[in-house]
Amino acid sequence: MGHVTIRDVARAAKVSPATVSRVLNTSETVAPELKDRVLAAVKALDYRPNSQARSLRTRATTVLGLIISDITNPFFTGMVRAVEDRANEAGYSVVLANADEDLRKEQRYLEVAAAERMAGVLLSPASVTDTRIDVLVERGIPVVTIDRRLRTAAVDRVVVDNRRAAIEATRHLIEQGCRRIGFVAGRPGTTTGEGRLAGYKTALKEAGLPVERELIVGGDFRIDGGREATERLLALKDAPDGLFVANNLMTIGAVNALDQAGVRCPDDIALVGFDDMTPALDMRSRLTVVSQPTYEIGRQATELLLRRIVGETFPVRHIVLSAELKIRESSLRERA
């Protein structure tokens, strides 16, 4: 008989290949009767799973894990594209996982990457302080963080100067004559959220404007959060005349809230969003945004990871790229 496969065992035991796999990996979820049938078939066919496991392991070493915080966010589209392009050029495949801003989910994916012995992992951490990559570090699997940094481990990272970009965006609104600028903030505990908030505050202070707590509302980087935060700002007794929104999904929510309330941009409120929009959106052509070099972030991060994988040693790299303020209709006021 030729090489016995897991499918041969499954056929002989009258179960699915997945069940055979579960039995061989000593899973508790298999009924005793099925387990006995599988083990009997393994014995009768003299099936040896080790060579297969070995070939799987060697295959896994050409796989890169890419764990991102929110797959619905268009920010990641260009970045994922760049990671795939660069990885494929170097003979690697990419497995994409969506942690959904959830630490538990993220931890599971990190554990899978470790168990599968992936060659390396690119990670957009859900939290600066609570994301833990020990499972990868212990196995010597290199990690590069993208978009956000990690305070719990010294690893290479590729980020954008969020603070600088937020200063420019807020400054632009001040130059348009705005004096009460609402800020829809991102997730606390992320470097992107913190950097953008710090930039907004810095620009206000530079212009001699007060930083007012009621004008800063968290939107959690999600569409619904952006809408609710904007509704709260519009409901203030002294409503804002400018609005800076800390990411693209929240900007969609903000625009929905403004439309719903019949508030016009830029006549009633001047609006700037962080991150470009998907081309499919009508509003893209008229929104002033901070545009991030998403493809470049992905390319440079993958480049660093591939260098670590082949064993290059160099001090931890911290690459900071610049974002660009693209001024369009939503923030341009007619100057008197």
Image (cartoon, rainbow, N blue to C red):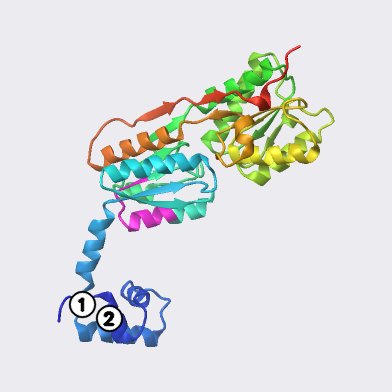
Distance from the alpha carbon under mark 1 to that under mark 2: 8 Å
Compare residues 287 and 227 and report the one nearer the observer. 287
> Dot 1: what SS?
loop
74, 208: nearer the viewer: 74
- Give the numbered dot on residue 89: none
The percent position of residue 128, horizontal first and vertical second, equals 50, 39
User: In the rendered image, which residue does mark 1 sit on?
Assistant: 4
Q: Amino acid at mark 2?
A: Val
Q: Which numbered disc, 1 or 2, marks the residue that appears first in the sequence?
A: 1
User: Callout 2 environment at 10 Å: few (<14), some (14 to 19), or many (20+)?
Assistant: many
Residue drawn where x is 22% and y is 41% of the image = 310
Q: Is residue 172 magenta?
A: no
Dot 2 falls on a residue whose secondary structure is helix
Q: What is the three-letter code of the residue carrying label 1? A: Val
Q: Position of residue 67 (x, y in %)?
A: 43, 48
Residue 245 picture location, percent across and down: 64, 33
User: Which residue sits furthest left?
Assistant: 1
Q: Is residue 214 visible?
A: yes
Quarter of the image where the C terminus is located:
top right
State the image quarter where residue 40 is shown: bottom left
| Residue numbers of the magenta segment | 109-121
Residue at the image point whose x is 36% and y is 54% from the top = 113
Left or right, 257 with respect to 286, comes to right
Q: Are marks 1 and 2 in contact (CB under 8 Å)?
A: yes
Instruction: Provide the residue designation for mark 2.
Output: 9
